[in-house]
Image (spheres, rainbow, N blue to C red):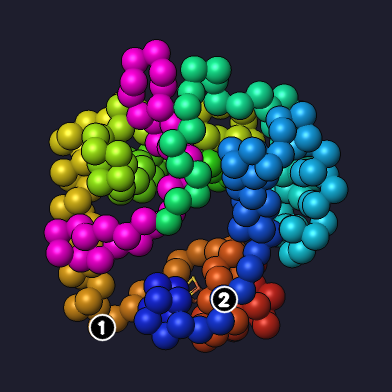
Amino acid sequence: MAFKLQYIDHVPQEQNAYAEYGSHCHSLLERWAKGELLSFELADRYEAEYDEAVRHYFPPFPRGLAGKYFEEGKQYFLSFDGFGEDMEILSVEERFELDIRGNPFVGIADLVLRDRRDGGIIVIDHKSKSMQSMKKELFANTRQLYTYAAYVKERFGEYPSMLRFNMFRYGTFIDEPFSMDRYDETMDWIDQTIRAIKEEKDWLVSSSGYFCRFICSTRLHCPVGEEIIHSGIKE
Ligand code: SF4
């Protein structure tokens, strides 16, 4: 249902604290990568701009979410020292348009680096998601990076050697060495998914009241979301 409301009906989008938090951290990393901020300036900018950037409240449960997210971001930027001395920045937040099996496809790649030691290209996506939800659906999540691999091939003439999620709240990476089999599987999956969406008639609603109430960007324009918000149902 959310897909239909967002991409077909084009209803106005509602923000949420998770998305605003992620955008704030992305913005700082983007400005660093473009040379607009230095590493040692990031923690101060993070704090100074936080209230303006994260305007929605975090959900009240699990308890202490707002403080936890703020502190994790602060610690990350306090200790931030780039992505390695041997890395050359090739592109930053570059929007791309691709043709995938005859389907137009648009995306934005957070950061593309070249490792000067072996010449390999590394695609990085900054993630504010929990480690638990990333690992639970890792196979599906890495498909996103394989679409960026298609952009890298078109833009730089070669496939990346490494796909990397920057799990910045944890100060760690999830790495997946590039696999041509997985790349082909992702291209097939995108093609099949787009075909399925074009033929979809019964748009399913989410089974998560938490998602509808606090996260869904179209929740104010969906009967299910409106009902949950007004009834106060939490899960
Ligand atoms: S409010 Fe829930 S059911 Fe409605 S579009 Fe959003 S996720 Fe789907």
Q: Is residue 138 left or right of residue 110?
A: left
| Location of residue 51 in the rendering, given as x and y in whole percent from the top left corner | 82, 56
Q: Quadrant of the C terminus?
A: bottom right
Q: Earlier in the sequence, mark 2 or mark 1?
A: 2
Identify which residue, 211 or 49, lies in the foreground. Answer: 49
Screen quadrant of the N terminus = bottom left
Looking at the magenta stretch, what is its main secondary structure? strand
Residue lying at 47% horizontally and 27% vertically, measured from the top left: 88
Question: Quadrant of residue 108 in the image?
Answer: bottom left
Residue pointed to by mark 1: 201
- Magenta run includes residue 64: no
Return the residue nearer the eye: 90 or 201: 90
Determine the secondary structure under disc 2: loop
Task: Answer above or below: position of 171 versus 99.
Answer: above
Label 2 to label 1, Cα distance in Å?
Answer: 22 Å
Q: Tell me where residue 196 sits by quadrant.
A: bottom left
Label 2–label 1 contact, CB within 8 A: no
Which residue corresponds to mark 2?
13
The residue under the point 44% across, 36% down is 90
> Count the marks: how many?
2
Q: Secondary structure at mark 1?
A: loop
Magenta-tinted stretch: 96-125
Across and down, in percent, residue 25 comes to 66, 46
Asked if the beta carbon under badge 2 is closer than 8 A to the nearest atom of ligand 1, the reply is no
Q: Is residue 121 magenta?
A: yes
Give x and y (percent) for residue 225.
Answer: 56, 78
Q: Position of residue 6 (x, y in %)?
A: 45, 76
Amino acid at the residue labelled 2: Gln
Near mark 1 (Cα within 10 A), the count class, few <14, some 14-19 or many ≥20, is few
Q: Amino acid at mark 1?
A: Lys
Q: Nearer the viewer, mark 2 or mark 1?
A: 2
